[in-house]
Image: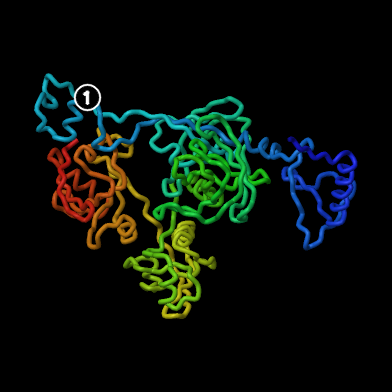
Amino acid sequence: MNTRINFGDRGIRAGLVALTAAVLITGVTWHSFASGGPVNTAAAVQGTAQTPTISRAIAGGRDSYADIVKIVAPAVVTVRTEGRMRVAPTGFQAPNEDLFRQFFGDQFPGPQRGSPRTPQMPRQAPRQSGLGSGVIVSADGYILTNHHVIDNADVIKVSLTDGRTFDAKLVGSDQPSDLAVLKIEASDLRPLAFGNSDAVEIGDVVLAVGNPLGLGQTVTMGIISAKGRSTDNQAYEDFLQTDAPINHGNSGGALVSTKGELIGINSQIASVSDGNIGIGFAIPTNMAKRVMDDLRDGGKVRRAQLGVTIQGVTSDLAESLGLKQVSGAIVSGVTPGSAADRAGMKQGDVIKSFNGQPVEDTNALRNRVAESTPGSNATVVVIRDGSERTLTVKLDELAAPRSASSTTGSSSEDKTALGVTVAPLTPELAERADIPKGVKGLLVQEVNPDSRAAAAGVRAGDVIQQVNRQPVQSVEDLRAAVRRSSDRPALLLVNREGKDLFITVRPS
């Protein structure tokens, strides 16, 4: 038996009268998100302090974000890339002879390399294509996207919503923040205005715009779920977390407020299924703008360095140290001669604030130091032996990882190029990479799969301690040592997972 409840016309009219009376009594007013001003009404009633103002986007008599999307959509682009695929040095490659040689070396029976019967075939990584999103942020064609969207790309193309496609130039890229800046030569662009990401609050409604899964431009809605998130202790992250659905292809796209302002660059998702589960992360625009300005001005991001190893404050540590709050960053080590050392910072100090801003955890401190100008003075408040002390620190500049390859990236053109990216092993870097104490040298951060270092078995995470029995502490040391090897194989002493081993790298 079907039951249908019908209130009739009288019930509907009574309801409308009651709703009108409620509006007049409570003082609720209606606003449009798109215009930021009140919708035209017959009368305006002043709301009380206890009665919040309700804001709603109204278009054609329906709730809608269409006016916001019309502003945002032309500024969000599709980024397509082509480049070499990164493969491990032991990856399977054709022909079969090469496959077996990777495991057994030149002892593998059969025609030897260089013999008349075996043509010399260069080993090249296979090519791959990629897809992501980007945001036009200036009328002259600058675009923000993610570093991982364009990483290792040889060709970058940008497609606009009006159907135009342009070749894009990579202005600069910053892996630690996962940001990159592109430039296209185009007219009639409609850039998106920056919003103040620091002013965003948990619970704010946001829209995510991008090209998920290559379906085409897509808009999703959610709220800001959390602020100050970090997923990688080695990166500079201060994510806005959102439940607005984000999937593969959304990377580099826009997270916008209901004012139509850019407040974040969509970057990551957390998922057990590799798909959206309502936990997405966006890089705040205040951080993105600083990185973009550095990349546009100098091609690299300049960050300050304090020179300490830090760890978070737990409830047990707070109780042991007599702290009133479970917050701050404990100094577990001070680099000799560093900015912190010169300012008198000690092991065991608890950093409570940096330049007047409270330090909630290690991630907050790392970001605030990195955002500062190298060479500037910073005021740091620490707790030592139960009392507060204020230190003035003249910040150093964080040394960017340098590559021991040629500037063109072609090892065939530079006999000193090993094809590795290395960084001097500082105490902070050693702790992050879990390198044993006492190990000195250069940390291998990346290995070109087509390089002779990869062919010799050098891996990311190795620490190059010596070359031809000579210690190496800088990129210049490494270059000079390899150069002296001339046409002889270079003998490298590396530390791998706490064990020392020798590796021979053949000449170019």
Q: Residue at x 54, y 68 (%)?
A: 356
Identity of the residue furthest to the top in this view: 117
> Which residue is the site of mark 1?
95
Q: Secondary structure at mark 1?
A: loop
Where residue 237 appears, x then y in whole percent? 47, 53
Quarter-wise, where is residue 417 in the image? top left
Question: Percent position (x, y) of residue 418?
Answer: 24, 41
Q: How many marks?
A: 1
Left or right relative to 120: residue 359: right
Q: Residue 125 location, x and y as percent?
A: 30, 30
Residue 374 coordinates in the image, percent (x, y): 44, 59
Quarter where residue 12 is shown = top right
Residue at the spot x=51%, y=38% of the render? 247
Front residue of 431 and 476: 431
* Image: 364 above or below 318: above
Quadrant into which the N terminus falls: top right
Q: Nearer the viewer, residue 105 or 134?
A: 105
On screen, 277 above or below 202?
Answer: above
Seen at 32% across and 28% down, the residue is: 126
The residue furthest bottom is 386
Q: Is disc 1 surrounded by few (<14), some (14 to 19) or many (20+) residues within 10 Å? A: few
Q: Residue furthest front?
A: 1
Indicate the quadrant containing the C terminus: top left, top right, bottom left or bottom right.
top left
Hey, what amino acid is under mark 1?
Pro
